Image (cartoon, rainbow, N blue to C red):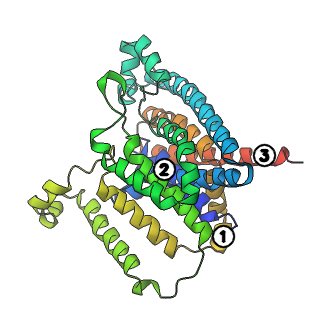
């Protein structure tokens, strides 16, 4: 049984937070380097999968040591804290966007951030905010995680004993996702359908349990393992597909019309099967190819790991930094130097927050 903490999990959580920040800054050139440009999935899948991995790892340990009741209480307490943070974060985000909109004359940031609903119907918007139905841009992942945490006490006992059964039920719910979603403001639905994304969360938890129980080295080289070869081929094909979107003539040449009719749209809301399969293939290949080792001790890896250990706090900061970076870029004339500077400065501020949280945690130890 593997007992040590896998530092690769923290590293990729931190990397996902960087990608999420860059993807959420409009016209950011560094967003061209994120995972969404080279396949069908993006940093959202990484975030949700590793959130399930970390949650089951942490609360499963508490359940085995102190019982399921105490583990459930701690899960619900965490969900409550996140709910309060969500409301506070939305208030801060609106304040930043309204302030920025009064200083940027070339764009309507309120409209771009999806806050026009609050201006036109503030009373209903406040009610929807309390019910997690009002979610402007950048605010979708946190309500999803709250709902997933609320459901974790229901499945954790069985997940620890018979993970296969829980995964099977979760798969059945995932298949129902296209016809079942939660309500959002103005008659809409959640951008991240919890019925679909819970499957990725559960798969993350099941992967954490599997990693604890089995750490046997592979008996054959990777190129002779059919699953690894198949996953690699799928990543190459979907990577070529994603790159072809930049050149419509190339896309039309490699994707027949009949295939495009079955392939599109690739839904992010309902976690389209081709998106899900792409992420699972990516996670499997990375887990096989990227080893434990000294590379995790270099400076950048240490910063990413630290951000990954405090992922929720750093994510919340990133939600605030994205519109601030957008405002800074607009005031600077959207010049390339300013766009790169604001994106890198945002990552630096996130790293500083993670360092401060780590230092503060050490101060509280005896």
Residue at 17% across / 61% down in the picture?
251
Mark toward the start of the polypeptide (1 vs 3): 1
Look at the numbered disc 1 and give the secondary structure of its residue.
loop
Q: Earlier in the sequence, mark 1 or mark 2?
A: 1
Other-residue count near label 3 (Cα within 10 Å), few / some / many at <14 / 14–19 / ≥20: few
290 to the left or right of 256 = right
Estimate the spatial distance between the alpha carbons at disc 2 and disc 3, rounded to whole Å.
25 Å
- Crowding at mark 1 (Cα within 10 Å: few <14, some 14-19, many 20+): few
Q: Which of 9/166 is in front?
A: 166
Residue pointed to by mark 2: 48
Could you tell me if residue 356 is visible in this image? yes
Q: Residue at x 74, y 49 (%)?
A: 66
According to the picture, the residue beneath numbered tag 1 turns out to be 2
Q: Is residue 53 left or right of residue 108?
A: right
Q: In the rendering, which numbered label is found on residue 42? A: none
User: What residue does disc 3 label?
Assistant: 361
Residue 122 location (% of width, % of height): 42, 13
SS category of the residue bearing label 3: helix
Position above or below: 306 against 99? below
Residue depth check, mark 1 versus mark 3: number of the one nearer the observer: 1
Assess whether mark 2 and mark 1 are in contact (beta carbons under 8 angstroms).
no
Residue 323: x and y in percent read 48, 34
């Amino acid at each position: 049984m593997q007992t040590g903490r896998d530092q690769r999990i923290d590293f990729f959580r931190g990397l996902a937070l960087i990608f999420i920040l860059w993807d959420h800054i409009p016209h950011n050139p560094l967003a061209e380097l994120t995972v969404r440009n080279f396949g069908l999935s993006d940093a959202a899948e990484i975030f949700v999968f590793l959130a399930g991995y970390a949650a089951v790892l942490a609360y499963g340990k508490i359940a085995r040591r102190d019982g399921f009741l105490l583990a459930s209480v701690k899960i619900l307490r965490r969900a409550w804290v996140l709910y309060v943070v969500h409301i506070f974060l939305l208030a801060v985000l609106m304040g930043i966007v309204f302030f920025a909109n009064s200083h940027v004359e070339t764009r309507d940031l309120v409209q771009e951030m999806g806050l026009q609903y609050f201006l036109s119907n503030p009373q209903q918007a406040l009610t929807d905010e309390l019910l997690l139905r009002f979610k402007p841009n950048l605010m979708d992942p946190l309500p999803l995680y709250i709902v997933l945490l609320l459901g974790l006490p229901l499945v954790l006992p069985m997940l620890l004993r018979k993970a296969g059964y829980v995964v099977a039920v979760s798969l059945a719910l995932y298949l129902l996702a296209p016809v079942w979603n939660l309500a959002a403001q103005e008659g809409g639905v959640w951008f991240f359908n919890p019925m679909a994304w819970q499957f990725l969360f559960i798969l993350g938890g099941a992967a954490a349990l599997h990693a604890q129980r089995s750490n046997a080295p592979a008996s054959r080289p990777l190129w002779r393992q059919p699953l690894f070869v198949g996953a690699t081929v799928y990543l190459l094909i979907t990577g070529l597909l994603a790159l072809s979107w930049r050149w419509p003539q190339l896309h039309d040449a490699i994707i027949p019309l009949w295939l495009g009719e079955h392939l599109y749209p690739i839904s992010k809301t309902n976690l389209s099967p081709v998106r899900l399969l792409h992420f699972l293939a990516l996670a499997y290949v990375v887990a096989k190819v990227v080893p434990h080792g000294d590379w995790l001790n270099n400076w950048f890896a240490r910063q990413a790991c630290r951000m990954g250990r405090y992922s929720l706090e750093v994510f919340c900061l990133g939600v605030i930094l994205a519109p601030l970076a957008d405002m800074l870029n607009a005031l600077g004339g959207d010049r390339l130097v300013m766009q790169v500077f604001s994106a890198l400065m945002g990552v630096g501020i996130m790293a500083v927050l993670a360092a401060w949280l780590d230092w503060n945690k050490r101060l509280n130890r005896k």
